[in-house]
Amino acid sequence: MQRHETILNLLAKEKHVEVLDLCKQLNVSAVTIRKDLKLLEEKGLLFRTHGGASLENPYIKEKAVIEKEKISVEEKNGIAQAAAAQIDENDSIMIASGTTVQALSKFIKPKNKLTVITSSLYAVLHLIHDKNIEILQLGGYIRHSSASVIGTYASQILDSISCSKLFLGVDGIDFDYGLSTTSLEEAQLNQKMLASAQKTIVLADSSKFGKKSFAKICNLNAIDEIITDSGISSTIKKKLEEKGVKVTVV
């Protein structure tokens, strides 16, 4: 069917499509589009999502940090470099967990003093040799899969902290569900970090869009900026900007 071919062609280009957008482009009802998507999913050609469809399974399974750091390495390094350029002289920043924000720590070269609060053990290992960087390592239980701390001890420290920027890594970005990760305790710590930062910058490669995971961190309106790679589709970029999120593409 020609309509099915059009849907699949759009998916190949955009990676994710919305039901309402397909209705406008194909001039058919939402009921018809949902039936089309169901048939295409049954054939194994796409995955249905809330309000649309994706080429990839939108539900994320947990992977160890050692496995994740081998994925999209060039994209993550580019994103990390762009994020490092936003750090000001005598700044105070927070670095959450995740391989992209972990990559950020490799590119931080402060001209003067810098204060870094972090839950990431790998970030500390990258930063510890620079005497211009004062590090506050959050304490708590170690989450092996992300090499980061979680729990109430880390959360309690954040009650007494305020910083200019939070650099946040996520497992999924979905327009309806928001930002998510695979761990509920990590999501709860991320929420405390959001409350302690004046500005939140999400570092996420383009594969994270249209994905969701078990634990929700926040809605899109809680963040200020996303730094991503050129794999992001123009449609997704436009929708994020319409929601008031600055999108920086590297």
Image: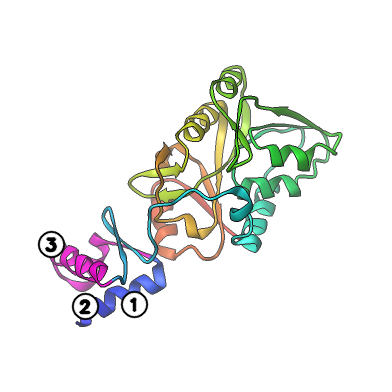
Residue type marked 1: Asn
Residue at left offset 44%, top offset 43%: 180
Q: Which numbered disc covers residue 31?
A: 3
Residue type marked 2: Arg
Q: Main secondary structure of the magenta part?
A: helix
20 part of magenta stretch: yes
**Would you name the residue on which mark 2 appears?**
3
In space, the residues marked 3 and 2 are separated at their CA atoms by 14 Å
Q: Residues within 10 Å of mark 2 (few under 14, many from 20)?
A: few
Which SS class for mark 2?
helix
Q: Tag 1 or tag 2, which sits nearer the N-term?
A: 2
Residue type marked 3: Val
**Would you name the residue on which mark 1 appears?**
9
In space, the residues marked 2 and 1 are separated at their CA atoms by 10 Å
Please report the bounds of the magenta region as a residue range.
16-43
Q: Quadrant of the C terminus?
A: bottom right
